[in-house]
Amino acid sequence: MISRTRFLGLLAATMLAGTTTVHAQTRLTIATVNNGDMIVMQKLSSRFEQQNPDIKLDWVVLEENVLRQRVTTDIATKGGQYDVLTIGTYEVPIWAKQGWLKKFDDLPAGYDTEDVLKPVREGLSHENTLYALPFYGESSMTYFRTDLVEKAGMTMPEQPTYDQIKEIAAKIHDPANQVYGICLRGKPGWGENMALISTMVNTFGGRWFDMDWKPMIDSPEWTQAVGFYIDLLKNYGPPGASSNGFNENLAMFSNGQCGIWIDATVAAGMLFNPQTSKVSDKLGFAQAPVASWPKGSNWLWSWALAVPESSQKEEAAKKFVTWATSKEYIQLVGETEGWVSVPPGTRTSTYETKQYVEAAPFARFVLKAIESTDPINTTQEPKPYVGVQFVGIPEFQAIGTQTGQTMAAALTGQMKLDQALKTAQSAAQRAVRQAGYAK
């Protein structure tokens, strides 16, 4: 029988242990991008904290280009500033190969990895192992205002050509009433203007590099694609288009100021939601436009959550990432924010959920766009790299960003198109030669 003295001692020890547990809170610093879906995640993450009182979340929400710069610097220098990173299908395979990311090879059975769409799953893997989990996945598509197209007496094909896009944009362009024929990404950045321009180059028959890693930026195909892009924006785009990225164009289209917008499929939910869009009842959609080559006109991307090797809080970080990318999280968004707002493009089960399919008439259309992408067989001529709207090598972040800046300079008239293409060609040639790619 336990003595009273010993009992009181054990009781005090137990109380002390309980007090220690309460105070042993793990703080996670999460770096993410400032788009609508991520803001919803931040808002709903209080549920995660309620379920896990030993974990506290600190958020760093950044503009896309700034986010890429900050997390790349942090992980390359092993700074350890962040415990969870928001990165994409470009960074994950490259950083995993460098040994910079934790593996997700110990997911609970309930996570149902096979439910994650195959193109997205493969894009976030290295040597068949997941190194990040997808928050949402996307391709690109064409949005348009049905009322303007009908008023112009025209019809948007299910998959228009770029010539048809130009013809329709010209008809509905009405700058006197602040309605512009077309909105496109003009903000410089490999993930901003170059995401769209790369798909245009693909479908106009071009590529970034030939099989000997010779840049092809000064080729006739690039001249034609970029010339078409500049012509569209100069004649039928909004003023200051070189400052507009995804968020700026989303705001303009939602406000009724864009007749046509070619961009990420993830915008569909926000544009179709009457709480966030003035044109939700006038929204039409079509596949991404094509030119002379039918492939590579729609991109493949996933914003995903990863845990850097430099984090000392692996268990808590993986617990949060697993929660934020789970079926349960999608259910939570559907029940609290409305089913049209759930993160799309990641799970087969989302597209089998009756409430989502009824709320999002674009659902199967988006799923088809994602499943039709092929990061390998994209271009008319063979290429030595993986990626639709990017080149899957570490040097592309610098090459793509510099090329984006010269394309923006051509758009604003600071450089002639030929000069911009030659400048980008020279920079890319120098980069791949220094990296040892060029033969």
Image (cartoon, rainbow, N blue to C red):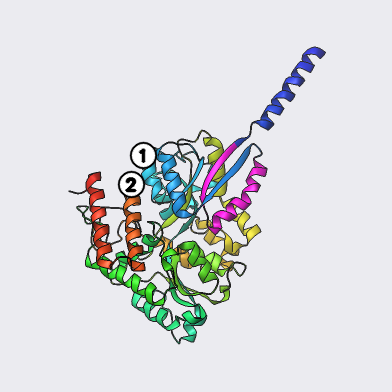
Residue 220 in the image: state x and y as whole percent: 22, 68
**For residue 18, what is the image quadrant?**
top right
Q: Nearer the viewer, residue 62 or 309?
A: 62
- Residue receiving disc 2: 394
Q: Nearer the viewer, residue 261 or 281?
A: 261
Residue 29 as seen in the image, left or right of residue 384: right
Cβ atoms under marks 2 and 1 closer than 8 Å = yes
In the rendered view of the protein, which quadrant contains the N terminus? top right
Residue 127 as seen in the image, left or right of residue 105: left
Q: Nearer the viewer, residue 308 or 114?
A: 308
What amino acid does circle 2 point to? Answer: Pro
- Residue receiving disc 1: 98
Q: CA distance from mark 2 to mark 1?
A: 10 Å
Q: Secondary structure at mark 2?
A: loop
Residue drawn where x is 56% and y is 48% of the image = 324
Q: Residue furthest right?
A: 4
Q: Is residue 38 magenta?
A: yes
Instruction: Please report whichever mark, 2 or 1, sits nearer to the chain's N-terminal start.
Output: 1
Q: Secondary structure at mark 1?
A: loop
Residue drawn where x is 24% and y is 56% of the image = 209
